[in-house]
Image (cartoon, rainbow, N blue to C red):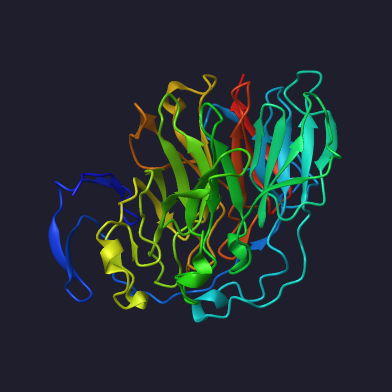
Amino acid sequence: MKQFLFISMCMGVLVSCAEKKEQAAVLDDTIATEVTDTFPKPFETESVRKFSKALGWKEGQAPTAPAGFVVQKYADKLENPRWLYVLPNGDVLVAEAGTKGALKNAASFISGNSKSKLSDGSADRITLFRDTDKDGMPDVREIFLEKLNQPLGMLLIENTFYVANTDGVVSFPYKKGQTSITAKAKQITDLPAGGYNNHWTRNLLANKDESKIYITVGSSSNVAEHGMDEELMRANVLVMNPDGSDKKVYASGLRNPVGAAWAPDTKTFWTVVNERDGLGDELVPDYLTSVQEGGFYGWPYSYWGQHADPRLEGKGMDLVKKAIVPDVALGAHTASLGLAFYDQKAFPEKYHNGAFIGQHGSWNRSVFSGYKVVFVPFKNGKPLGAPEDFLTGFIANADEVYGRPVGITVLPDGSILVADDAANTIWKISVAK
């Protein structure tokens, strides 16, 4: 079994296979695997529903960054700003979309009731921001695209602009500098939609020569409680040609991959994944992982490699044997969504080539987890240490939060933007002058 870095949820330290080896039988003893962690047992603690109430930020109030950084309000009065994309000319695009309807019973999928109808509640548009006077803050704001269907991922390849709606990828002609698109959408490919409503997001990423487009698609359930037939082409990273042809599964067993990026100066694809709920406070950790073509990452049959989910009652054990251990644990129920590698030089050297991760925050934990942006240092394209807090202060008290960070992007000037969809705000973090 390969050595890997495991970030302990309880102790926040790195542990390697060589440091700790215990033999454990999995379910029916058909698999023996090395246990190299301090995971609690499933159901060791009760599965708790604890939803946060978003207060919003008062005037002059902002999240907290480390010493030497400045946090500014880049934009506000948006509607569920979820994702960010920077065009080559520096324009910033914000996908405004959300879960449709109030989550009347957000944990209902655990008991198998994930098909309840919810009313519409998504802006379904993309807004453009432009800084014409080069002062670092936008002075132009326009609706770039509207009448979409829960858009998230955005991608420009030459003169074609792609949007990942929840039910498919569409494209539009694009001319440099235009502030809005009114052309009719061209359907590039269909994607499976529906199911557990929080997994509506679809992200896009191109390879270096832009000959392929990768698409992240989350599961329609928590642990396939409605059967695997409903998970066709889901819980995967897909890949296709820019015209939609030759679509296939690139990697599988990823419950809800959202953030996706290439590590700087490497050919390695990385994603952040929301893991399953219902097993207790400390299970299962969300994670950051490199993605291998043809790789299987466990869902729904196992987690963190060969840890079999007892709710699957021994199913899929042939696949469990092949499950790849993720690279970096990010804490249980943190809802890690955003991912951006820092490919600029303005921040101190420790941040160069490292990964910023937006943690939207828990609902299935007795004490809040997530609700912050963390940073994972990298060296030579590989994680160098445990996640460390970067942007905090989102939690107001035991039951309330000011906002919830999601998407992250790096600007050409070396600052970063963080989308706060609960507060309808975009935050800019830059080095203090």
Is residue 124 at least partly visible in the picture? yes
Q: Nearer the viewer, residue 348 or 16?
A: 16
Count of numbered tags: 0
Q: Nearer the viewer, residue 79 or 381?
A: 381
Position of 387 with respect to 137 (left or right) is: left
**Residue 145 in which image quadrant:** top right
Residue at 47% from the left image edge and 48% from the top image edge: 272
Position of 134 with respect to 37 (left or right) is: right
Residue at 35% from the left image edge and 60% from the top image edge: 298
Position of 1 with respect to 243 (left or right) is: left
Q: Is residue 29 above or below residue 210?
A: below
Whole-percent x and y of residue 17? 18, 48
Residue at 48% from the left image edge and 58% from the top image edge: 235
Q: Is residue 91 above or below residue 165?
A: above
**Residue 99 in which image quadrant:** bottom right
Is residue 73 at least partly visible in the picture? no
Whole-percent x and y of residue 404? 62, 52
Single out the residue that lies furthest toward the front. Answer: 245
Q: Is residue 313 above or below residue 390?
A: below
Whole-percent x and y of residue 120? 77, 66
Position of 46 with respect to 49 (left or right) is: left
Q: Nearer the viewer, residue 185 or 98?
A: 185
Whole-percent x and y of residue 345? 52, 19
Quadrant containing the C terminus in the rendered view = top right
